[in-house]
Image (spheres, helix red, strand yellow):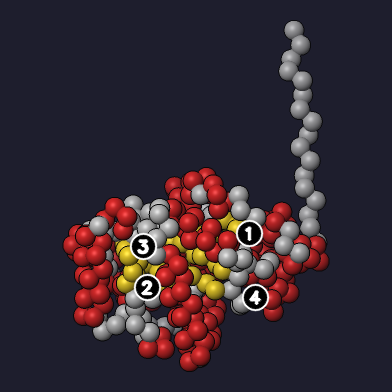
Amino acid sequence: MSGAPSQPPRRRRRRLTLDEYEAGVRARDRVVLGRAITLIESNAAADQQLAQELLGRLLPSTGGAVRVGITGVPGVGKSTFIETFGKNLTGAGHRVAVLAVDPTSSRTSGSILGDKTRMTRLSSDPSAFIRPSPSSGSLGGVARKTRETMLICEAAGFDIILVETVGVGQSETVVADMVDFFLVLMLPNAGDELQGIKRGILELADLIAVNKADTGGESARLAKREYINALRMMHGGAADAGWQVPVLTISGLNNSGLDVLWDAIGKYRAQAEASGALENKRRDQLKRWMWSMVDEAVLRALRQHPDVARIAPGLEAEVLAGKKPPTLGARRLLEAFGIDAL
């Protein structure tokens, strides 16, 4: 009895050179673009070195895109909104990249992976590119790779970058710190929403859009008034260049109000560019990005230090038992790492 025919060995893809990566990205070769982002996402030391060299070469060709962050509560219709909004933009001649920040993706595979199959029209659009976040589980690591992916996409000629928050909590702050404009999508049920929404998210918003206005009716209009009042109580939300945060009612499903929303983003950008606020915001973002990478690397090095790893379990047990105050435990760990602090 003969067995199944043996499969030929799978050919390993040839590793691209730095010149090939750069040329492919600049030529808008989608295969090379995907491989360049995979290189960025790799944690291998050799890949990281090549990735940083590639970013160094491409950096002069970045910065020209409109960067928009998008967040929203579960069920708000983000994927429907992004697909309709993205198709409007590509129809107007723009090239759109959709990225995600998802600190939970190592457990859930990231909802944007599902969104990519649901956003069939946008994912098949030659002027659009959808990329899920890497499954690293670390918010800092995901954010860094998303930032670098954004630069690669800008160098490839995408002039609008939509960065979606898929996770919850801190991810909103992280996304707001890498974009020019932060859009918060809300459901029409304002009373329940205002009870549960974090004040910090409203403070981050450059625009609030009440989605599903096609089914919300009067509740959508009521929600709009509630959010306007909430922003007034918070003294105006975003402060860049004196911007007054608009509240709109939209429908991603019916493509209603999305043109007004895009006009508002354009007005914000024009105002921020004229006042210098946009340049200052991006400069501050770069500085914070650099220091966040330093913080992440130092913390990783501290936790992996052999002397720290040796004494940490005992110190944790003593702190938990009330035998040592946390401050003394922290001092001992820092001393083991070689830092005389606290």
Q: CA distance from mark 2 to mark 4?
A: 25 Å
**Closer-to-camera residue (8/261):** 261
Q: CA distance from mark 2 to mark 3?
A: 12 Å
Q: Residue furthest bottom?
A: 275
Image quarter of residue 72: bottom left
Q: Is residue 148 visible?
A: no
Residue occupied by mark 1: 127
Q: Badge 1: few (under 14), some or many (20 or more) residues near its Cα, within 10 Å?
A: some
Q: CA distance from mark 1 to mark 2?
A: 26 Å
Residue occupied by mark 2: 207
What residue is drawn where x is 34% and y is 76%? 246
Question: Label 2 amino acid?
Answer: Leu
Where is residue 254 shown, x and y percent of the image?
A: 40, 54
Residue occupied by mark 3: 250
The numbered mark, 1 or 2, whose residue comes first in the sequence reads 1
What residue is drawn where x is 44% and y is 53%? 79
